[in-house]
Amino acid sequence: MSKLERNAGFGEKNMEPHDTLTPMSETLVSKEVLELTLSEALTRGGEFAEVFVEDRATTSAVLDQRRVEELSSGRDRGAGIRVVVGDTTGFAHTADLSEKGLREAARSAAAVAREGGGGVREVSLRSLSNYPTHAMTLPGDVDKARKIELLRHADDVARSEGSSITQVQVALGDSSRRFVVANSDGVFAADHQIRTRFNISCVATGDTGMQTGYRPIAGTRGFELLSEGAVEEAARGAAKQAITKLAARPAPSGDLPVVLAGGSGGILFHEACGHGLEADAILKNASVYAGKVGQQVASPLVTLVDDGTVTGEWGYLAVDDEGRPSARNVLIENGILTDYMWDYLRSRKEGRASSGNGRRQSYQHLPMVRMTNTYLLEGTSDADEIIAQTPRGVYVAQLGGGQVNTATGDFVFGMTSAFLIEDGKITAPLRDCNLIGNGPEVLQRVDAVANDFSMTPGTCGKDGQQVPVGTGQATMRLTSVTIGGTAA
Amino acid sequence: MSTLIERAERILESAQSGEEIEVFLSSGVDTEIQAYQGAIENLSTASSSGIGIRVLRDGAAGAQVGTAWSGSLDADAIDDVLREARDNARFATEDEYLAFARPDGVEPVRLDLVDRSVQSTPLDEKIAMAIELERLVRAGDTRIRQVDSANYSDYIAEAVIVSSAGIKAAYERSGAYVSVEAIASDGSNDQTGWGLSAGRAPGDLNITEAADDAISRATRMLGAVKAPSQRCTAVFDPRSAATLLAIVGSALSGEAVNYGRSFFANRIGEDVASPLFTLVDDPTDKRHFSASVFDGEGLACRRNVLIEGGQLKAFVYDTVSAKRAGTTSTGSAVRGGIAGSPSAGCRALQLATGDLDQAEIFRRVGNGIFVESLTGVHSGVNPISGDFSVGVTGLMIRDGELAEPVREITVASTLQRMLLDIVLVGNDVKWLPSSAAGQSLAIEGIAVSGS
């Protein structure tokens, strides 16, 4: 099971205010030590070894009930080492980045090579491919007081939307993640990823109880991401959403046409097919999309892309966590399945190139196939027309998250802001509920795609690892989806 | 253990006047094994440690707190953490209710939550368990066409919490788990089933039970169809009932209540649930995998009765949420590791056991739906508004017996309604690696949305 969360926890923190662009390999672990560590990892007969060294500094600030409740800073650095022997991977990690610490971890990871007899194998790395950050204002350069000012401003803006707003929680966080990855094939790359996020949650209270509103802003950018305008818009949006929902009626139950607004609706594709197109599920024949390359798996209106190269987006990567430059990969073209997403090891086994989708939560985790920014290319319809041409249905303005079983294709996604469509018009707000469907079936039901493309950030969880991803699409319609409400 | 305590206490010595320091140190060793096609797919062993420091400083209108953490216990890293926590405190809002926990005289219970055989069991034996688990599932039924992953994992960890407010708590814990996901096929369709077994050490694990659970859940879903929309009684199996109880528990957090973010706010003394519903949070009950001697602030854990015979009795509090509510901590601080700050939460929920076995519950319900697994809980349940809508796989109950399997449906209600609509409680308690144990639970008036 894999799932995507919009309002994921705020686990990110920072502490080293100065941040330089010096490649970490020069400051923390030298090329020579990386080469020695890789050789050590292969002495028992492994055929592939990799060292991943990471240094991450994160900060977070939370304003709750108009109080700055917490500023937190964190620092985590260490190395993960893996050794591959046949179909077996040995993995160890350490926070000790000395040559001795790395060699110990290498031996520990190599313990899976039980037969031994590898002998000495020299590893020589290529010259470093270094990817500096695109961020303009680095997290360490932002005054903490400025961050708090922004939180307070968001709180004020949200409360000014109406007296029914009784609760506002605003959070801001950033992370500076530098890593260097080197493997026994000679790959040697370093990246510096700066991410910034902001989110605001509002509670509105009325005669009908309490309702919630939520807006995130997140990008692989520095503090420049959080312009006052963007923050105000998010604050107003979250407050209005909560207030509007006070008048919400129970959502219908049963099958109805659904119009998904541009942006968060992209989660549909993340769940309905994204996870099922990851090569780990494919190679284990644990996906409904296994063996279907070249086949029509979706409506001809569906062209789905996973693209790590979209600069500044939440799922942007210069290079993946295995040292492969990110790429724009077309997964489904006009409804026809063109390719899966690949990581280094699985593509190495298949004798093909990685698609740049090898990602890991941290040095303490093994990389696996993950999405980056996954989006549906926009179409030619007009969003208002699509609504006008829907006599009865549900308009979903915001989705909150979802979950999929890749083996059966069954998935759910939750609507956190939705309205009835009656006679081609958006009418009554609806209470939160999940929608449920089967990936391969729902993909065939896309019958209109508009030209108002946008993206939203999310946190994707798979096998216990969380990574930042983007999802996107334009306003689109599904001819029928099961709405999990309570009204007849 | 004593070295961790000593290290932590040394840090307290650097407290300056007008400030208090709290140090949380943890250290552990983990093993993870995944088996695939009779061999090891991944084997990971690692030790890790970390430190979280909170600094509280006195101000005119109350205290301020700042937090910092590090995944390394190097002396330099610890100095950085302390300096940064101190700096962060300067920016927090002064809050008259903010304080660190102080010893409250409640004696910690004696609980042995660590089994050293986690360390002494040879790695080869652990590997053999994962491989055997996979073999059992593959061999257990001809309809099993794939085992996505068969996993073994264990850990042994120690942690200490000390503060210049007089807190000194140290504890150890171990755990071992196996889990497996089976894919069954009837030639045209696939279904999945997940099985697990948990304990404090490898010797506690029941591999056969985990394998049988995965096989039975996957195979009995074969041929599942979408059920028609209807309103009926739903019987939640122990695992899905535990998920439900954990959500109810999150709304019983004193912090959520203080901030008006719970549908239980201002309802103490009211009948919020069926008379059959008595809910207790008791981390001192060793049967819970989440049992604990100390809470996240180093106070002794204790038994708290939250709902009794349907009546709302109490909330769980940590030190700050308790002060804000004008009461005292219930020893219920939870914290998410070194990077997390304490907050009020339930740790070990249990519903008072009923007297019916599952088969008897099916008989009494007659017609309804048996909910075997839930999806989209994070996206479809809102503990503030109480809205509840989740994806479900399970089986229909007809004439008191399990009938055809169903999938791609949702069940929906509100949490408020569901608690009142509980009609039967089972005696089949399942202890799970979660903040709640679960048993079969029948709830009427649930909206099933399907075809």
Image: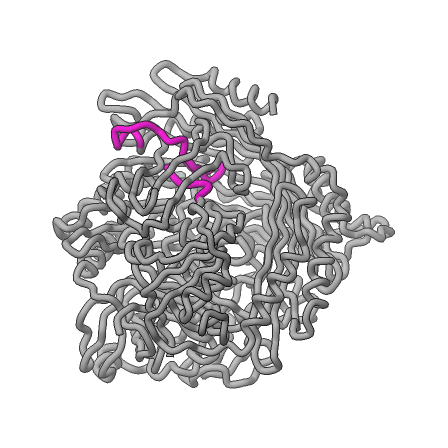
Q: Residue at x 39, y 82 (%)?
A: A445
> Viewer-proximal residue, B37 or A38?
B37
Residue B96 visible from this viewpoint: yes
Up-down relation of residue A472 to residue A320 (above or below): below
Which percent across, then down, holds residue A173? 37, 45
Q: Is residue B56 left or right of residue A306?
A: left
Q: Quadrant of residue A322?
A: bottom right
In the rendered image, is residue A305 in sight?
no
Does the magenta portion include B332? yes
Q: In the picture provided, is A393 more to the left or to the right than A437?
A: left
- The picture places residue B300, in percent across and down from the top left corner, at 45, 27
Start-end of magenta stretch: B322-349
Q: Residue B276: x, y in percent?
A: 36, 50
Q: Residue A468's image quarter?
A: bottom left
Relative depth, front residue between A140 and B426: B426
* Residue B321 falls left or right of residue A49: left
Left or right of A446 in this view: A85: right
User: Quarter of the image containing the C terminus of chain A?
Assistant: bottom left
How many numbered tags mark residues here? 0
Q: Which residue is depicted at the point 54% across and 42% down? A: B289
Colour scheme shown: one colour
> What secondary structure is the magenta-colored segment mainly?
loop
- Residue B400, given in percent of the width and then of the height, sits at 46, 69
B225 or B385: nearer the viewer:
B225
Most extreme residue toward the left is A163
